[in-house]
Image: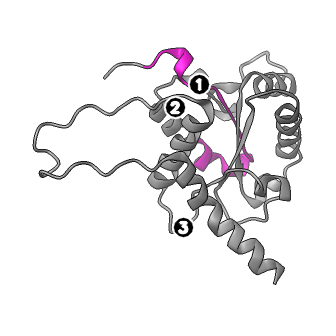
Amino acid sequence: MTTPSPASVPRIFVSHSHADNDFGVRLVTTLRTALGGDEDSVWFDISGGAHGGDTLWRKIVQEITDRPIFIVVASPHALASPWVMNEINIAWTLKNTRPNRHIVPVLYEVCDLPADLLMQLYVSFLPPQTFEAGLASLVTAIHALAGTRPTPPPAAPVGASGGRPPAPAEDPATARVRQATPLIEAAFAARD
């Protein structure tokens, strides 16, 4: 398997509440591996993002500014955190003033997303969704937003698929519709 070039690995900032650290560390660790990146590919302040001597808030602002994809781990803790809300505000300002900026909410726990985040492509890790399925959806969304291609898996040995061709991957537009449908249905149900 070839290692992707640094230019083909999307650069991501992950915003979260420290109450959600266990999920966040698991997400970031597996996301870095899935994207073929290193520690620098996904910035997360609990796992190597901030270093001794850094002024934390300045470092956070710099990293949000330097990275085109902003992921927020959405939970009641995150939405109650002034730090997370400030990070979201910076991401929105950048999204509205610079090209190719993206905000992706990751639904970790049931919560009332603000209207502005409801309008974004989101990825659910809520049950019955498994972590692996949520991660696969997130990786697909990131590659679609960044305009990069995922690193292809190693070729399977001949006959490994049992004579059946592999199932085609879901295209990004279909994935967005599939992900948005429950949200739209919930919004209509709440309105009625």
Q: Could you say where residue 90 lies in the image, as x and y percent from the top left?
A: 87, 35
**Disc 1 residue type (three-letter):** Ser
Q: Could you say where residue 142 lies in the image, as x and y percent from the top left?
A: 58, 38
Identify the residue position indicated by label 3 in the image. Answer: 127
In this view, the residue in front, 107 or 100, is 100
**Disc 3 residue type (three-letter):** Pro
Q: CA distance from mark 1 to mark 2?
A: 7 Å
Q: Secondary structure at mark 2?
A: helix
Closer to the N terminus: mark 2 or mark 3?
2
Q: Secondary structure at mark 1?
A: helix
Closer to the N terminus: mark 1 or mark 3?
1
Confirm or deny contact between disc 2 and disc 3 (CB under 8 A).
no
Q: Secondary structure at mark 3?
A: loop
| Magenta-drawn stretch contains 179 | no
Q: CA distance from mark 1 to mark 3?
A: 28 Å
| Magenta-drawn stretch contains 14 | yes
| Quadrant that contains the C terminus | bottom right
Q: Could you say where residue 109 lies in the image, as x and y percent from the top left?
A: 66, 62
Which label is found at residue 159? none
Q: Could you say where residue 113 lies in the image, as x and y percent from the top left?
A: 79, 60
Closer to the N terminus: mark 1 or mark 2?
2
Which residue shows up at 67% across the image and 50% down it?
Answer: 121
In the figure, is residue 149 to the left or right of 75? left
**Residue 49 falls in which quadrant of the image?**
top right
Q: Residues within 10 Å of mark 1 (few under 14, many from 20)?
A: many
In this view, the residue in front, 12 or 55, is 12
In the figure, is residue 53 to the left or right of 179? right
Can residue 60 be seen here? The reply is yes
Confirm or deny contact between disc 1 and disc 2 (CB under 8 A).
yes
Identify the residue position indicated by label 1 in the image. Answer: 41
What are the residue bounds of the magenta stretch? 4-26
